[in-house]
Image (cartoon, rainbow, N blue to C red):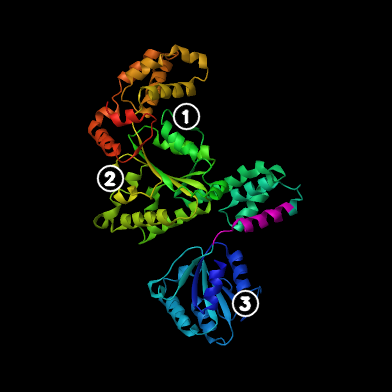
Amino acid sequence: MQEQLSILIQAQYPLIYLNTPEEERAERAIATISQIKPVRRMFTWTMMQGLVEYGQTSGAQHNSLSPEAALASIMRADHKEPAIYIFKDLHPFLNQAGTVRSLRDAVANFKGTQKTIILMSPIQVIPVELEKEIVVLDFPLPDMKAIEEVLDQQLGQVRTKKVSAETREKLVRATLGLTQDEAEKVYRKAQVTNGKLTEEEVDIVLSEKQQLIRRNGILEYIEDEEDLDAVGGLEELKHWLQQRSNAFSQRARNYGLPQPKGMLILGVPGCGKSLIAKTTARLWSLPLIRLDMGRVYDGSTVGKSEANLRNALKVAESISPMILFIDELDKAFAGGAGSADSDGGTSSRIFGTFLTWMQEKKSPVFVMATANRIEKLPGEFLRKGRFDELFFVDLPNGEERRDIFKIHLCKRRPDVEKLERFDFEQLSKVSDGFSGAEIEQAVIAAMYEAFAQDREFTQLDIISAVKSTTPLSRTMTEQVAALRDWARMRARPAATSVAEYQRMEF
């Protein structure tokens, strides 16, 4: 980005919008560019200090606190003298006609000169009047080299013993996505907490990323407490995930493998789709971040919803590699391709923004999405290349139901000997047509029944709870059958037994 900014300044672009929250680091980069011949004087403007030459703490130009006065002042300056003017946080003034008119006058005044105005702000606000005049650049977060310099500086200050190359890489990678100031603070926090900076402090560094996600408001950090053993059946899907457990490593890149894009898991509700996402994060040792599409939509300002999504995706990319989890994709983007009549086209624009990002993203963000109603999902999501694979999760078969019963009973009765009193074959037969979630609720209902009577729950309690429950496969037979018909020729079975998958009947 610094090279691109340098080219624009040397090419005499009069107005540049630099989108960044890191003022100091961006100023240092611009100061370096200003020394390229012809050397340019550099000035900064804030609404509190007015126009001040860079590096000076005083000496503001007279009566330059207002943007209009500052712009008038720089237009009166010697046109032959090369200069860069940085206006910080001018975005609140860009809805005022006077400020916009002054900027347009300055742009016209600066054409053909070595003068450039840079609007520096963490928020992108561009009036329609300036769209043809301005160039927008995003100042990137620190890369690995910059973070390594921050780590070296902190290690030098605490005079800790030399850390291994592997530990350095883990500490640096854990910090990617933070600003330079945030990286400095989190390294100091780790050092103050444990008096050292080693591999053990990676968790402290990662906690700062959780704060970054919480501040975003649209993304949610999900703790991964379960592993793949907590999922009954779905062996084909598990095998696919295990094969890609090192997909984001440098070894995979050296082998020639591309970074995986994502996967879409569709199927009957309650059959473990969301659980698979949570267990994948632990298997791959990556953070799992949920994108809440409900929080993206904001009707208060035109374009606010699209900006929310872009900002959320930018945060996701900044903390990659990671897994971006979108639960019930069919509800999030239902009707997105044609929403002009219902919401003025907001859903359609959100849908287009997300599709474009999925197609063009280069960062290692693995999109893991789930869906229940495939007919509500826009067809653009399902074409080849959007996701690496499309899996269908059906109701569990007899063997899988036995595994699910064992998993939930082991959670609540870790003592293995106590499980001998259960006949899992019988439990599997009476629960035919039940989803994994319905089996779990039957076990919980049986436990509540026995708990109320102050006794241990039994096989009969579970059978009674199962028989008193009407599973979704019976209340929504037509929808489940339609989903199976659609998936039979279009999706990959998540279960090992292809023959049973193809049979797909109750």
Query: Sequence order check: which comes first, mark 3 or mark 1?
Result: 3
Is the N terminus in the top left, top right, bottom left or bottom right quadrant? Answer: bottom right
Q: Secondary structure at mark 1?
A: helix
- Report whether 349 appears left or right of 287: left
Q: Is residue 360 a member of the stretch shown in magenta? A: no
Query: Sequence order check: which comes first, mark 2 or mark 3?
Result: 3
Which residue appears at 57% of the width and 62% of the height? 22
Q: Secondary structure at mark 3?
A: loop
Residue 65 is at least partly visible in this image: no
Residue holding disc 2: 376
Which residue appears at 44% of the width and 24% of the height? 408
Which residue appears at 51% of the width and 13% of the height? 417
Q: What is the CA distance from the residue labelled 2 to the residue labelled 3?
A: 56 Å
- Report whether 24 appears left or right of 112: right
Q: What is the CA distance from the residue labelled 3 to the residue labelled 1?
A: 60 Å
Q: Secondary structure at mark 2?
A: helix
Residue 497 point in image, percent of width and height: 37, 28
Is the C terminus in the top left, top right, bottom left or bottom right quadrant? Answer: top left
- Picture quadrant where residue 181 is located: bottom right
Mark 3 Cα shell of 10 Å, populated few (<14), some (14-19), many (≥20): few
Mark 1 Cα shell of 10 Å, populated few (<14), some (14-19), many (≥20): some
Disc on res. 36 = 3
Residue 308 point in image, percent of width and height: 42, 56
Residue holding disc 1: 230
In the rendered view, would you say 239 is above or below 264? above
What amino acid is at disc 2? Lys
Q: Is residue 150 a member of the stretch shown in magenta? A: yes
Residue 475 point in image, percent of width and height: 25, 29
- Of residues 483 and 117, the one nearer the viewer is 483
Disc on res. 417 = none
Magenta-highlighted residues: 140-155
Q: What is the CA distance from the residue labelled 1 to the residue labelled 2?
A: 30 Å
